[in-house]
Image: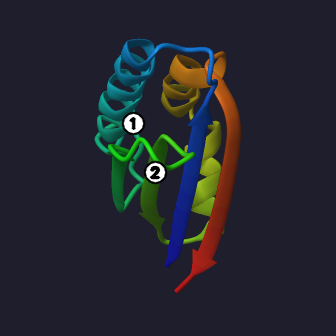
């Protein structure tokens, strides 16, 4: 099993309201993917509620293999979900761990 963990930081120039609206749309879009992308075993998106921290979004997902992560990453529905925050994203970090 592969755990795919991604965190996102949004641009500082966005208002708090803009950030929350984008974050909620992104969460809804990503968490709607499992019925459309059958390689996803589990997926959830957390929205950071602690203003003292630097990162805004945490995505946690599980797959059977790294190949399945690649299938997910290149799927058109996943790409469309990523576009929601593409222009607002300042930074992204990712770790894929085999369990």
Q: Is residue 76 above or below residue 53?
A: above
Residue located beneath label 1 in the image: 30
In the rendered image, residue 17, in percent from the top left (x then y), is placed at: 37, 14
Q: Write the residue at 46% across / 50% down.
A: 58
Q: Report whether 12 appears left or right of 2.
A: right
Q: Residue 85, how many percent across, how many down? A: 55, 23
Q: Earlier in the sequence, mark 1 or mark 2?
A: 1
Discs 1/2, front: 2
Residue at 59 percent of width and 28 percent of height: 79
67 vs 22, left or right, is right
Q: Secondary structure at mark 1?
A: helix
Which of these two is toward me, 55 or 61?
55
The residues bearing labels 1 and 2 have C-alpha atoms spaced at a distance of: 9 Å
Residue 2 pos. (x, y %) = 54, 73
Q: Where is residue 76 drawn, in percent x and y?
A: 56, 26
SS for dot 2: strand
Q: Is residue 69 above or below residue 57?
A: below
Residue depicted at 43% across the width and 58% down the height: 60
Report the number of numbered marks.
Answer: 2
- Given contact means CB atoms under 8 Å apart, are the residues at marks 1 and 2 in contact? yes
Which residue in the protein does label 2 denote?
59
Crowd band around label 2 with a 10 angstrom C-alpha radius: few (<14), some (14–19), many (20+):
some
Relative to the observer, which residue lies in front, 75 or 18? Answer: 18
User: Looking at the image, is 69 positioned above or below residue 87?
Assistant: below
Give the label on residue 5, or none: none
Residue 43, by quadrant, is bottom left
Pick the front one: 9 or 40: 9
Question: Which corner quadrant of the image does residue 36 belong to?
Answer: top left
**Horizontal side, residue 10 vs residue 61: left or right:** right
Q: Residues within 10 Å of mark 1 (few under 14, many from 20)?
A: many
Q: Is residue 65 left or right of residue 77?
A: right
For image coordinates 35% across by 48% down, the residue present is 46
């Amino acid at each position: 099993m592969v755990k795919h963990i991604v965190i996102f930081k949004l641009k500082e120039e966005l208002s708090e309201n803009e950030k929350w609206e984008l974050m909620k749309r992104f969460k809804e879009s990503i968490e709607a993917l499992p019925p459309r992308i059958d390689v996803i075993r589990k997926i959830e998106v957390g929205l950071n509620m602690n203003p003292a921290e630097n990162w805004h979004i945490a995505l946690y997902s599980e797959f059977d293999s790294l190949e399945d992560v690649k299938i997910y990453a290149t799927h058109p529905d996943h790409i469309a979900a990523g576009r929601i925050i593409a222009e607002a994203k300042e930074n992204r970090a990712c770790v894929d761990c085999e369990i």
